[in-house]
Amino acid sequence: MIFTKRQLLKNSAGLVALSALGLRAGPSRAAAGEFRMIEAGGTSGESIEKGYIVPFTEQTGTRVLRESPSGLGKLRALVESGDSSVPLLEVSSPELYQAVALDLVEPIDWDVVNPDPMFDEAKHEYGFGYQYYSTVMAWGEGERAPKDWAEFFDPEALSGKRTLPDYAAYILPMAALAAGSSIENIYPIDLDKAFESLERIKDSVSVWWQAGAQPPQLLKDKEVQYAAGWSGRVAGAPGMEFTYQQGLLDLAYFVVPKGVDPELKKAAMGLLHEMSVAKNQAVAAEVVSYTGPSPDLEKLLPQDRIGEFPTTTANKNVQMFNDGQWWFENADEVEQRWQEFKLTL
Amino acid sequence: MTEPGHLPRLLLTLAGITVLLFLCLPIVIVVPMSFSSASSLEFPPPGFSLRWYQAFFGDGRWLVAAGYSIVVALIASTLALLIGSIAAYGLVRGSFRGRALVESNVMAPLIVPQIVTAVGLYIYFAKLGLLGTLFGLIVGHTVLAIPYVVLVMTVAIRSFDLRIEQVALTLGASWPTMFRRVLLPNLAPSAGAAWIFAFVISFDEVVVTIFLAGGIETIPKRMFNELVLQVNPTITAIATLLIGFSIITVGALALLMRSTGTVRKALG
Amino acid sequence: MTQSPTASIRPGRSARAGRLGATGLGFALPVSLFLLVAFDVPVLMMFGWALTSAKGMFAPFIEFFTRPVYLKVILNTLRIAAIATVACAVLGYVLAYWLRSLSGTARLVALTLVVLPFWVSILVRSYAWIVVLGNNGVVNRGLMDLGLASEPVAFLYNDLGVVIGTTNLLLPFLVLPLYAAMIRIDGRILQAAETLGASRWTIFRRVFFPLTVPALAAGMVLVFILTLGFYVTPAILGGGRVPMVANMLDMLINRLPRWELASAISIILLILTVLLHLLYVRLSRQAGN
């Protein structure tokens, strides 16, 4: 053997240390005193920490470990692997329907959550709608403001580079509007017309963004003049303007992965209750200008910035709502056409 | 041919320097930006400030991430060096059935696209309960570092004359003595290089880490998330620190190799 | 692989001279076991997804070949990889040739600079290009100040941006082995050619260049393989307009959890890479001789 005794000793010591590390950080310790949650990350994650986790831990003594980013892939991995240590995972509204169809989620125990008053759409059998966000028009300071999506999608009426989401669900409704649909009868979306709008504008689109931070950065760098971006990113950011007019309102949900430890699920329902409390939602909205599902939240928000929040009565009335059910039913076809469209860029 | 004329010579120098500049441009640009007073990425920087270094050293989360990065990279690179070097020796000096297979298997993590490895490990680790553990992350990084260690060590062992080993053994040295007195001192510089290589591979790894790390933050994972979530010049300060660290280690390595005369061999 | 690399390096010596013989396997055992448990099994399990799809055994493969979009993305990846490879080859050859002509400290410094980028995060190096090449970036402002361009040139968020970023990252992988091959060329051969009255250009074309071709080709294959799996750079510099297979896999895995299809594409990608790798092994063995 080429090992000296000392080396052997060192090696086995290393292995012992390794396994000790593994045990220490392992999910096995995720007993009743704490649980893991998977959320979107960034300032949104910080808002969950400040708004909901801090009061929850104060009251129950249960610690919550946040992990990010989230996604259906992670949900599927949890379920397929039988990992029962994550009782909460964040999804978008189209993802919620897909998760239900793929049989990856359990119903929310609404009796245990026992929520304060919430908007109806936020109380889904399988999802707790905890955060409203909106996809809105934004433009660089000094640029001419677009009247509506029709003008936004017309490169001749409004010259300048654009950035659009690289997610069909956040841009096709606008493309349909630009093609002549009205907010009331936008669903079912006429895919042919919507893709025609995209075809018309695609040469003016510099970047198809995947990360919410990109639109404000691109506007600031003057890489683009116009953006369709998430409200929490562009509202109140320096060097740019935005409007909720014809914005696309959507909800982020927390779901319970199938097969989760019932003890942890019960604890997690307590955290969801904290998310229904208007006072907590106001704290979260201070961190990022997305809003919680309480109808009483509006008066608790900072009044000098009230125009920045997506669910105030004034702002909610001028927006359209994304139809998660439609997206779920048409997911396959849309995804296919979207990918094919992207290849023609 | 060996002595090009003046004009071609000048053109060659110009072209060579241009390519070298292209190669180093990203580094050249990052360093001054880290000392910028601007609150976004701007070049040239409008003024001098150390605010991004303060932001890094003042933010516990960055320091925790740095701690994890260092721990993971240290253990993963050492483990990879250990089993990788032994394997390299066996591959070069041995002849056995299935050697080609072993060799391809060792190189496979380098060839298989990382995203494929990442997904495979993700599902597997989830089943074993290793997702989000330091242990799992270290195992993943070790897998990725092994091919680099084997590559460097195979070349080193191959270029080390087998007859010297044989002479030592013929003169009555036992295998362990030969290993300690002949092999180890001669291969140490290459092992050092392989180790640093493996360390950097692990330290810079982002794709597999994003999948496996769960709640554990490493520097590249945080950087990637920051780039995605908000553009933050703190990243340039970290990059500059890393560049400084790299220059120091490369310098140390050069000294190490020069002291054993390998630098001449390596550079021809 | 009938010929072992060691045998080809030490021609004329029989395998018996390898002192370890069959014990070599013992040395390779720890690493093999480790990789078996921590790499082979997980990757094979992943492949299992493509074959045990609920829709039928080969359903994901059928989907791959019947829906043109996936094949198109692979073709696009191959195209980008080919462009980046050629760019690396041209730039790399010039750089290696220049390095060869240097001596002493200049060579050491230049080589250090070639190696230096290796040590800097891929993320940082990709991201730096945004600052360099953006509309408001150094290059565009320079061009406009000099009057060479009236409006910013679109370097980023297109094929060009991805190629620039990729080439920059992979150049050292080509330069170093190529340089090593160049300095191994015996100067006496070149001198002999010169004595025989060949012009410099002829010597380069007929003697020097052919001797470097195997190393150049091996380096090109390596760069090509590495580009196929690139994920970070297209994500940062492609602006969502340059579909590459790694980013498509990320989407199929993380966004739509279509693991069966992702697994099928991974298998196809792997077969492609292994074939290229076999080519690489052959070429680099030629380069070594």
Image (cartoon, coloured by chain):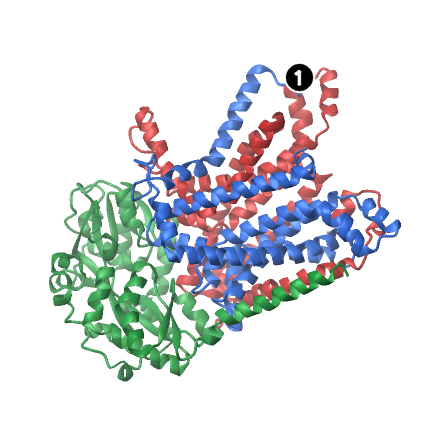
Chain colours: A green, B blue, C red
Depth check: A92 or A89 in front? A89
Q: Report the residue at 74% width, 38% height from top.
A: C289
Residue B186 position (above or below residue B22): below
Q: Nearer the viewer, residue A145 or A329?
A: A145
- Front residue of C43/B143: it is B143
Q: Name the residue located 39 percent from the left edge and 47 percent from the top edge.
A: B235
Question: Circle 1 sits on which residue?
Answer: C199
> At which x and y percent is residue C285?
70, 43
Q: Residue at x 33, y 24 (%)?
A: C146
Q: Chain of mark 1?
A: C
**x and y, in percent, of residue C71 in the image:** 48, 53
Residue plotted at (84% across, 43% down): C12
- Measured from the top left, where is residue B57 in percent x and y? 39, 51
Q: Residues within 10 Å of mark 1 (few under 14, many from 20)?
A: few
**A134 w.r.t. B237: above or below:** below
What is the number of callouts on the image?
Answer: 1
- Left or right: B42 as drawn, with respect to B149: left
Does residue C61 appear anywhere in the picture?
no
